[in-house]
Amino acid sequence: MRIGIYPGTFDPITLGHANVIARSLRMVDRVIVAVALNPQKSPLFDLPQRIELAKLATKHLPHVEVEPFDGLLVTYVRSRGAHAIIRGMRAVSDFEHEFQMALLNRKLDEGVETVFLMASEEYSYLTSSMVKEVASLGGPLQDFLHPDVAIRLKAHYRQA
């Protein structure tokens, strides 16, 4: 069984993320969405909430699991018996950082490959940060988020 790991903070998971996950299932038998603790960022949602939102956004996709992860990505990939790290690319601006990370991961473990999937055109501009800004200003979210995720994000800003 070929397993792909799709790591990220997913704060929150967007339709662009879900699109990459769905398309990656053409290349692997199972995708593990690895929701990173990532203490370097200050996420809007805590780790259990981000895991729950990722599960909601991917519940329609077969062979997708959502798990938390912390630590070195290649160590996590090895521990799950995975064959590839899956990364979405929106634009040239993503390339330099993603390329450096792929080379670093290969240096740490030459058996771990990174697969880059270009974002579908309809999501090539979309970032979680932009979606949070739209939500904070009361804007519509239906083109950016799974409906259940949109409800949770709107609720967060009503409470704030």
Image (cartoon, rainbow, N blue to C red):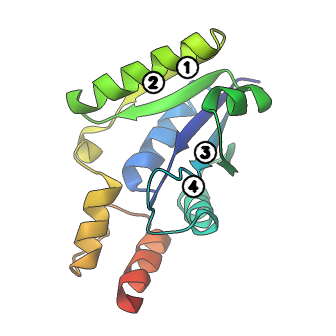
Q: What residue would you read off at disc 3?
A: 33
Depth order, front residue of 43/144 = 43
Q: Dot 2: what SS?
A: helix
- Tell me, yes or no, whether the two marked residues, 3 and 2, touch with CB atoms within 8 Å: no
Residue ID for mark 1: 105
Q: Residue at x 50, y 69 (%)?
A: 45
Q: Residues within 10 Å of mark 2 (few under 14, many from 20)?
A: few
In terms of image quadrants, where is residue 70?
top right
- Tag count: 4
Asked whether residue 143 is in view, the answer is no
Q: Residue 131 occupies which quadrant of the picture?
A: bottom left
Distance, label 3 to label 1, CA atoms, is 18 Å
Give, as a three-letter code, the residue at label 2.
Answer: Met
Disc 2 to disc 1: CB gap under 8 Å:
yes
Query: Mark 3 belongs to which amino acid?
Result: Val
Percent coordinates x, y for residue 12 in the rendering: 44, 61
* Circle 3/circle 4 CB separation < 8 Å: yes
Dot 2 corresponds to which residue?
101
Q: Disc 1 to disc 4, how far (Cα)?
A: 26 Å
Amino acid type, callout 4: Thr
Vertical position of residue 84 compared to residue 120: above or below: above
Establish if 118 lies above or below 20.
Answer: above
> Mark 3 or mark 2: which comes first in sequence?
3
The residues tagged by marks 4 and 2 sit, at their Cα atoms, a distance apart of: 25 Å
